[in-house]
Image (cartoon, helix red, strand yellow):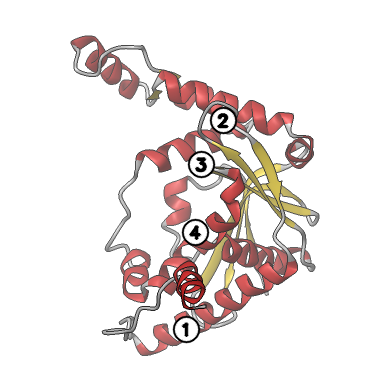
Amino acid sequence: MTVTIIPPGSESNEEYHRSGAWGSTLVSTFIRSPALAHEIISGRWREPETAAMRFGTAFHTLMDPGGSFGKSYQLAPDLDHRTKAWKEAVVAAEAIGVKLIAPDDWDALHRMADSVRANPVAASLLDGAVHENGFRMQSPYGGYRIQCRADLYHAGQHIADLKTTDDLDAFQRTVVNHGYHRQAALYRFIVSQACGKLVPFSFIAVEKEPPLYRCRVFDLTEEFMAIGWQEVEAALVDIGQRYSTGDWSEHRDAESVSPPSWMLHRLNAEAA
């Protein structure tokens, strides 16, 4: 299948996300709620930007040598936000298209970047990588397109994605909760169509909380990747069918709720 390569900087974030193609985040949304995913892909709903999203965007821009961090962001003056001086600083920044970053966040961003670069494995993935390389193609499962954009890409060799996290030691749970295994599987599939082979995929995760801002590189096992692709492929097939039928309802009006595994373990232990 033909894959359109989207060079770094050729599309803004807005253009990329409004392309009409399905990315991994939207596929995960579809698994949770087909109706909501359809509202988003149709342009009728846009998720409000949160402080965490803004922080993540700033971090990605800082890590990208071509991301123009210095032109897009400035260290905010250490002022009470209720003062006239603060409001004047915001107006002045907006006038030149710059976003102000609070001193604490500014320090965290730069310490996180230093932590990533100090990790020898992460540094090797950064070295010579193309940042924000996009890929878009027709879905093999219906009349719609799918896409991905790699934070770091060594052509035909390796894909890596930068993640900020609260706790490195809980990253396995984070992967499951946020569907990162689906992201990795979808990225590998699309890129394989462009380069003719499956390439390794790594997560470069860095803590966004003081004092250490630890960084660690995570590779999902092939079993984890297989589960991710199984979930992605089932979703892509379902998306194709729903485009054909026009039915985006959830078909889940009632269901039983089971206790989590830790509750069952406690119940079994007490009964023994």
Reading the chain from its start, which is encountered first: label 3 or label 2? 2
User: In front of the other: label 4 or label 2?
Assistant: 4
Mark 1: amino acid: Asp
How far is mark 4 from mark 2, CA to CA? 23 Å
**Distance of label 3 from label 2 (alpha carbons):** 19 Å
Quick one: label 4, few (<14), some, or many (20+) residues within 10 Å? few
What amino acid type should be assigned to the residue bearing mark 2?
Leu
What residue sits 60% from the left and 39% below the top? 206
- Residue 43 position within the rendered picture, expressed as x and y whole percent measured from the top left: 32, 62
Three-letter residue code for mark 3: Asp
Q: Which residue is mark 1?
A: 238
> Does 65 appear above or below 152?
above
The answer to which of marks 4 and 1 sits earlier in the sequence is: 4
Q: Horizontal placement of 241 versus 246: left or right?
A: right
Q: CA distance from mark 1 to mark 3?
A: 33 Å
**Left or right of 228: which side holds 72?**
left
Q: Which residue is mark 2?
A: 62
Q: Are marks 4 and 1 in contact (CB under 8 Å)?
A: no
| Whether residue 139 can be seen here | no
Sooner in the amino-acid sequence: mark 3 or mark 4: 3
Residue 215 coordinates in the image, percent (x, y)? 65, 37
Secondary structure of the residue carrying tag 3 is loop
Residue in the image at 55% along x and 38% along y:
60
The image quadrant that residue 246 belongs to is bottom left
Mark 4 lies on a secondary structure that is helix
Q: Which residue is mark 3?
A: 166
Q: Which residue is mark 4?
A: 178
Mark closest to the chain's N terminus, 4 or 2: 2
Residue 54 is at least partly visible in this image: yes
